[in-house]
Structures are given as C-alpha cells and as structure tokens.
Image (spheres, rainbow, N blue to C red):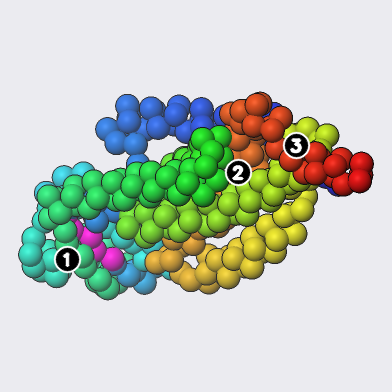
Amino acid sequence: MINFLKYRYATALVSLALIVAFGVVATYRYQTRGTVFTYSVDFTGGTQVLFKFNTDVDTAAIRQILTDNGWANPMARPFGDNEVLVRVKEFENDATGLGMRMQTVLQQAMPESGVTMIQTESVGAGVGVGLRGKSIRAIIIVLLLMLLYIGLRFWSFAFATGAVIALIHDGIIVLAIFLFLDREISNNFVAAVLTVLGYSINDTIIIFSQIREFLKRRTTETLDEIVNKSLNYTLRRTLLTSFATGLPVTVMLLFGGEALYDFSLALLIGIFFGATSSIYVASPIMMLLYPKHKLAGYGNADVHSRDAMGRR
C-alpha cells in the first residue's frame, strides 16, 4: 500500500512555491504592462484580425508598422503556420474594412510577405468588460454552489472546506501556468476552468465518500490510516479516469491547431492537478479540520454491537 500522506508536506511546498511564483510574476507584469494577463478581444474590446503570410514574419516589426500608421499599442502574436493574430483597441462595426486597411499598410511595408486577411472579429469595450465580470461571477457562483453541495452531501465543514480549497488551488495553478507561458485568457479558457472544477470535484467526492465509509466502519485505525487506505482504494479509478480524459485532450492539444490549443492546454493542466489536489490538498485539509470528537464517535456503535453478539 502506498503511503500517500508521507509526501503531503513536500507537495504542499511545491504548491506554495507555484502560488508564490504566480504572485511575483503577476506583480511584475502589472508593474511593467499595466495588466497581469493577456486578455482576448472578448474581454478587452477592440478589433482582432488574423493574417496569413507567405513567409516568416517578425511580430515586433508588424507592431511597429501598425504603430507608425496610427494604431496605438497594437498586439501581434503568432497564431499558426505563418499566421499572425493582430489586435488593436480601435472598434468599428465594419471590422472587415478595418482589417483591409491594416492589410494594405502591411502589404506596402512588407511587399514580399504576401499578406492575406483570414478572419476579423470586433467587440465593443463595454461588452468586453461585461463579459469579464460575468466570467468571474460564474466561477465564484460555481465555487459557492460546490461548497454548499459538499457541505450538505457530507454534512461536514471539514469535507466542504477541503474540497473547495482544492478547487481554488486548481484554478490558481491553471492561471499561474498560463501567466508563466503568457497565454491568452479568453472565453475558451473560462470554459476550460469551469470544466476542470467539475472534473476535480468529482474525483474529490469519490475519495471523500470512501473516507466516510471507512470512518463508519473503523475500530482502532487512526484518521491518517483511514485516509491513506481510502486513497489507495480509489487510486485505480483515479488513474483510469485521468488517463481516459487526458488522452483525447492530449490529441486535441497536439493536432487541434491554435484555435483549440489554449482550451486543451488548460484542460490538460487541470486534469493533472485536479487528480493530485484531491489527494494532496483536499484530503490533508479535511484531516486538519476534522473534529476529533467525531472521530472518536465513529465506529463505536459497530464495536458495541459486535461485543454484545460475542457475549451472547
């Protein structure tokens, strides 16, 4: 039997290091850029244009060309094979017309590049801010509902708190890795985070259900022994579920193209840390908060019943 709890302090240090690094990098980005994350046009508002080039191009040169022609603080990043996604703060109902003007400017500055406009998207600033606020509220509501569900499901503050802190941990880790990689925060990312929260809570519920079942049947086992036995008992299911969900997501990450890359990357990170947090975050926190008088009461009825049957 694997002694999972033996490594709980080491894994706690790893999680703490990632969270501290997240805070440091977030502070640095805010000081240098004025914003922590790179948001998609869905959240910032403006116009987004996808260009295709016949040759490799330098995104810094594209930003400079657009700046010289009146577009303030444009963003340009590689999107696919010789494709560049350009975003400007300017909003127009005729996004195609704005894209054509940008294409003309780029073609004149880089005639050998053979630039072609593939796609345009335009979102008003007010709409973008509204979507960002709704996304944050959606995640908060999900966390509160899950806290309520776990609390009612197990009728225990310790179980509910352990589960929700594990969910918050998973969300922070996914955000941290996207921040380290400077990936874009979009509607797809929010959908992936909500999916990860649902996946993680499912794994935690399975483990907690097994812990509660063993608690009811315990005689002389300690809480550490019960939790460790429960983790080993559910390990096979956890591994099989993680593999079954991780395999198609990995395929989507490798072959789905840039449009699905961020979504599948967030899912893959969440699947890994969701499985580990159920073991090394949710369970240890539950153990820390679990009332000792309840632990003493569990299993006593079964012990008394067996003693009475033995005396007969």
Position of residue 249 in the picture relative to residue 60 (left or right)? right
Q: Residue at x 68, y 57 (%)?
A: 238
- Helix, strand or loop under label 2: helix
Depth check, mark 3 against mark 2: the one in front is 3
| Residue 177 visible to an observer of this rendering | no
Give the CA separation, mark 1 to mark 3.
Answer: 74 Å
- Helix, strand or loop under label 1: helix
Q: Is residue 49 magenta?
A: yes
Please, which residue is most extreme toward the front here?
312
Please, which residue is most extreme toward the right here?
311
> Residue 277 bears which disc, if any?
2
- Helix, strand or loop under label 3: helix
Tell me the chief SS of the magenta region. strand
Position of residue 294 in the picture relative to residue 73 (left or right)? right
Q: Is residue 64 above or below residue 117?
A: above
Q: Is residue 291 magenta?
A: no
The residue type indicated by label 2 comes to Ser
Q: Which residue is mark 1?
A: 99
> Residue 300 bears which disc, if any?
3
Give the camera-side residue of 86 and 249.
249
Q: Position of residue 170 (x, y in %)?
A: 51, 44
Give the camera-side residue of 49 and 219.
219
Position of residue 155 in the picture relative to residue 244 (left or right)? left
Residue range of the region highlighted in magenta in the rendering:
46-50
| Residue 23 visible to an observer of this rendering | yes
Q: Position of residue 220 (x, y in %)?
A: 83, 34
